[in-house]
Amino acid sequence: MPPDDSENTPPPVGATELPSYGMEEDAPTGWRAWLHGGRLLLLILLLVFAALAAFGAKPLYRELKARRALAIAERAGEALDAGNGAEASTLLRQAALMAFEDERVADRVTYFAARSGDMASVAALGRKMETGSASNEELLVFGERSLGAGRIADATRALEGLPAELPPAEAARRAALRAGSLLAKKNAGEALTTLRDAISTLPTGETDALRVMLANMLLSNEDTSGRAEAETLLEQAATNQGPEGASALRLLALSRAGISPDAQENLAGTFERLRNHPASSPSDELFIARLRISSDPSGKHTAIGDMVAQLKSREAPADVRVTAARWLIGQQANEAVLELIAPEEPSHHAGALMVRIDALSGLGRWEECGELIEANRGGTVPDTLYHLFRARIAESRNEATAAETEKRLLRQVVQFAELPHILFAARYAESVGWKPEAFAAWRILAMDKGAAAEGLRGQLRTLPNNMRASDGADIAAKLLEIQPNDASARLSAAYFRLMAGQMIDASAAAAEEFLKAQPDSADILRVAALARLRTGQAAKGLEIWPGDNNEPRWRALHAALLRAAGETRQAKAAAKDIDQDALNPDEQEFLRGL
């Protein structure tokens, strides 16, 4: 029987994969193969990005720009907190230019600009307050700035808009605003109570500014019984490492100023504490120098030298040193100005140029002055200053023709100059007695809304001799339209109207009213004497005559009073040798026939 091989037969080969129960598909080919896997995802992403670019790029870009502008605005706020107004102004300008069309940016820029003192921005906050959309911080700033501008009603409205409950820092500011408003309303007692209550109830860290305010009020009071309390308050606030602490030390220094040895020792110690305070700035050196000199005039030279040395060692910025230099010029410390402002600085800082030129001219160093303006003409030397100092240099050399030529050019170019340069020219020309040039500059300044009052006052002071009193009366009337309650404007109006023969009764009554209020003022006495001359009371005018101060216009008025009172011989003697070229046509009338 043949052997059975079934056990040795290999099993049939089966499939190595389970069979597919779906439909079989062919492998992708062509463009479908290219889109397979990661490439498809990449294409989808590209399409999404293209859609965003087409429909969402602009809004996204605007949002990014707005956020950046907001960040810049917040940096401006930090600069304001640090007392750096110039940096804050630059940052706010950047933020506004970047995205002012965004409402959020506009609000923050307006808020910080209002904090810096821009009154147009303060008015914008007031409009928000009217609509009920102003935040607490906006109401506080509106109230604080309104109070500073003397608008007590607006400050009160801001107080009324604040809620009863506020965070401690804002509650402290509200207390200061309320106290300031009460003080402006002559309610000092309630203002003191408001501050004391806030100091006792609010957290200590939030009340140091209130302590300084309360101490200032106590020290300003004629009643000296509060000085000890003020000293305690200031010592408490001086431990504050922020601006409040530095303010406390400044007020302590003011309260301790005196000429006794003990006072000087206390004052010197307070100055050192102020210098070493974290919130002290180089500008404190000018404060210290001023207080040292007012406290001990005999130490003026030493105080000035120390200030210059401190400003240099503290590496004070140019703006601070220029401010100090302007004060030094007023102290006739021209050599100190040249030490404080380096020779190379005028080439890149207009203020440094002006004070250095001022100092050189004050020292009579006209050659150096000329070299300086020629070297910087077209840079930091504008045409106004160029012709101004060229005229001054020519006068110093007795070159009359050249001086008149430069003055004529000055009167021409000042019409197109920037306001700061016009103001400098006006003040400088007035200080050296150039009436036509000063008047021309003041007249241009008077066309600017912000400088109108100062420009009109300057015109009244420098009215050229070829103009009549009626011109002065017109200028005074414009000044009264701007500042109707200003005493000096009212006195000027009365004087020029009396000189011009206008509104004599009303002007004479105003002069007598001034005389009653200030009987020792020489200027008021002269205006009142003029009023009595115009109203037929020359003898009574002579009774109050205070002297002519050797001024041609007052000498002429005195002669006119004597003649009208029947003292002809004395009138002729008084009129002798008066320089009629120094008189205007109305003043010359006083001397006609004498």
Image (cartoon, grey):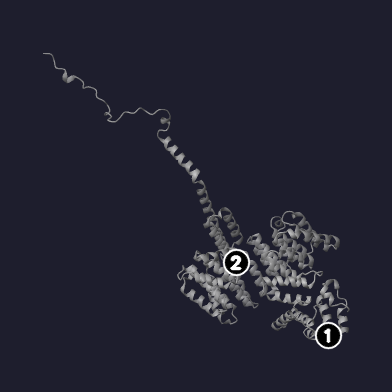
Q: Is residue 45 above or below residue 411?
A: above
User: Residue 518 appears in which quarter of the rendering?
Assistant: bottom right
Q: Earlier in the sequence, mark 2 or mark 1?
A: 2
Residue 316 locus on image (x, y percent): 64, 61
Query: Within 10 Å of the Cα at label 1, are there few (<14), some (14-19), or many (20+) other Cα atoms?
Result: some
Front residue (pair 469, 245) = 469
Residue 436 locus on image (x, y percent): 79, 66
Give the labeled residue for mark 2: 275
Q: Residue at x 44, y 40 (%)?
A: 45
Task: Report the side of 10 relative to 364 (left or right).
Answer: left
Question: Which quarter of the figure is the C terminus placed in?
Answer: bottom right
Q: Is residue 118 visible from the viewing direction of this image?
A: no
Give the labeled residue for mark 1: 565
Local secondary structure at mark 2:
helix
Tell me which amino acid carries mark 2: Arg
User: Residue 549 appears in which quarter of the rendering?
Assistant: bottom right
Front residue (pair 232, 47) = 47
